[in-house]
Image (tube, rainbow, N blue to C red):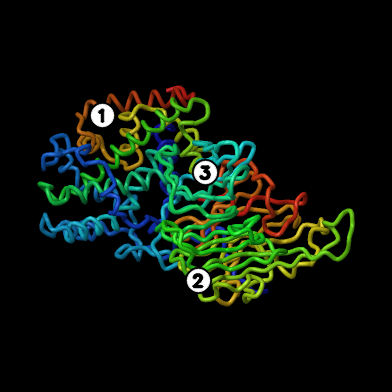
Amino acid sequence: MEANVPRFAAHRAAEGQPDADAPGELIAIRHAVGPPAGDHDAAKNAVTALYQIHAVGMIRLAVAMLGDRAAAEDVVQDAFCALYRRFGSLAQPDRALQYVRASVLNGCRSELRGRKRSARRLASAFSPDIASAEHDALIGEEHREVLGALRQLPDRQREVLVLRYFLDLPEPEVARSMGITRGTVKSTTSRALAALANLLGENR
Amino acid sequence: MTTLEDRIRAATHAAADLVADGSAPPLDLARVRSQARWSRWPGRHGRLRKPLIPLAAAAAVLLIAVAAIAVPRSPDSGSQRHHPATGGPAAVLPRYLVTVHTDPWRLDVRNAVTGTLTAGIKVPVGYNWNAVAAQGPRTFIASKNQVLMGPETSYFYRLVIGSHGAVTSISRVGRGVHGTVWAASVTPDGRYVGYLFSTTYGPDGSDASTQVVLANLSTGKVIASWPVPDNDDVASLSIDAGGNALAISTYYYHYTGLSADAAVKHDLTQWTSVLRPATSGTPVDKLPELLPQAGTLALSPDGRTLYEFLQAGSVARSPYQDRNPVTFDLAAVNAHTGAVVSVLHTWRAVWADFVPQLALGPAGAYLLIADGASLARVSTATGQYTALPGSVPEIPALENAAGKLPPDQGGDIDPLAW
């Protein structure tokens, strides 16, 4: 072995990353969805451009829902592939990102249901939370319990809490995102918090 | 704001923050062909379905929220991210690993993070699984060998793992190999396979032989082969993505005298070399030596970098006698010059007890390590070491790996695929 071998630090922090420029993002999206529908190359370029800008954010949303990086990447890839298949016939390409977000939420639901089915099928040999174990291990003890409890909630309750407290969306936006009424958001949030408190052993 | 809401916010952000800027894998639109018809998605008649229409009003807010909170744009966000070590595209992390086990002979499919068993593939009496290699994140090649009756023959099988770890298909590929396949490595496109095989008797009754072979997996046609001298053993084998190079580590024990305890009476010679088709026919001990050690190794997809467990400093000719801990490095080595480019991780262990298994993920972005029963992952770009929560059963000592004779230590040849 050579004496002066460079050794990597355990973590190399991301440095020099500029903050997101929201107006710039919007302009980029308009450019991305600009090409005419029906052109495969244009659709590919547009979807790829959207992906490059928003993939990490979508993966983070999926990770918050699933607690599992690999599954989150799968879900996001599927969502953008679905957008690509659909791109030529989108009535309003400007809404492509909304479509992707809805697909990601749907994909997360499917993934969690799939885990539950697997858990039932394999009984004790398979834990419903196996895929989340790595992230749970990495993010520290104080958050594991909360994430584990979140994943035990029904789909709608979990999504309400993630949209409300992870994305910090106000109730009307959560309502529009989920296609439910504002009243339903309120009641679902209330029930979800109560259920979560119960799971965590907190008194509310 | 109550404590519970704060806890939700903190926990979800802590989970999401593990996704680093610019770490998204490249978009794989090739999935489109393999996915189910898109009628499972909303809006199948050409328009977004009604429940999605209200989303339009939230679009700007959502975009800003995502952009401001979750998508800080990285400098390279405008172009496809490439893996710095390989020049190729970054890769998703494979979810499953496959290992070879005995008693009974079987392949185990496990979650690569938790080690949870998701499937097991046994073989009939008289057969065994000897080698396994990853073709892709969910596609593996394994060799099944006939060991009891009839001529020694090995066949390659392709295994496909489903979304929840079940084996969804097993199909035989290529022609049978006359002999026992001990180790194999396959290119990501499934075209080429490198393997180590031996025959007790040649097809025409000739003497036994052992060879490293580069072959077309589908047709079985041998492209190049390198004889392995009788006294030499191959400890590890790995092929590049183009089928242009095979890296092997090799060793032999030179007996210095007869003894009831021969294992402590002979010297160990070990080396690593890279085989290319142009050198076909040359015995492996006559090829240029890249490194004077024989650790478990993996060759990067572009064939430029070799990842190998190496003992730091010089290695004694009788290291099995030393019970003092020594330093081992997982090193990135220039596959042409043998120069150590970087050290990704370091261990302190007794030589004879340290037999970690190594598997390289797609695009060469990550290495999976099974050290005893524990699992860990190392980024080839940053050297970031992540101890994984799961574990796997220890690989049984069958053949000598990394030049360590049983009972000191052993293991099958590259029994781990990821």
From this viewpoint, is residue B358 visible?
A: no
Q: Residues within 10 Å of mark 3 (few under 14, many from 20)?
A: many
* Whole-number angstrom distance, CA of label 3 to CA of label 2: 28 Å
Kind of element beneath mark 1? helix
Q: Which mark is residue B113?
A: 3
Using residue B201 as the reference point, say whether residue B120 is left or right of it: left
Viewer-closest of A6 and B66 = A6
Does mark 1 fall on the same chain as mark 3? no
Marks 3, 2: nearer the viewer: 2
* Whole-number angstrom distance, CA of label 3 to CA of label 1: 35 Å
Chain label for disc 3: B
Mark 3 or 2, nearer chain start: 3
At which x and y percent is residue A84?
21, 51
Viewer-closest of B404 and B148 = B148
Q: Residue at x 29, y 26 (%)?
A: A188
Task: Name the residue furthest front.
Answer: B204
Using residue B361 as the reference point, say whether residue A30 is left or right of it: left
Tell me which amino acid carries mark 1: Val
Please give the residue where the numbered disc 2 appears in the rendered image: B304
Tell me which amino acid carries mark 3: Val
Rendered view: B129 above or below B214: above
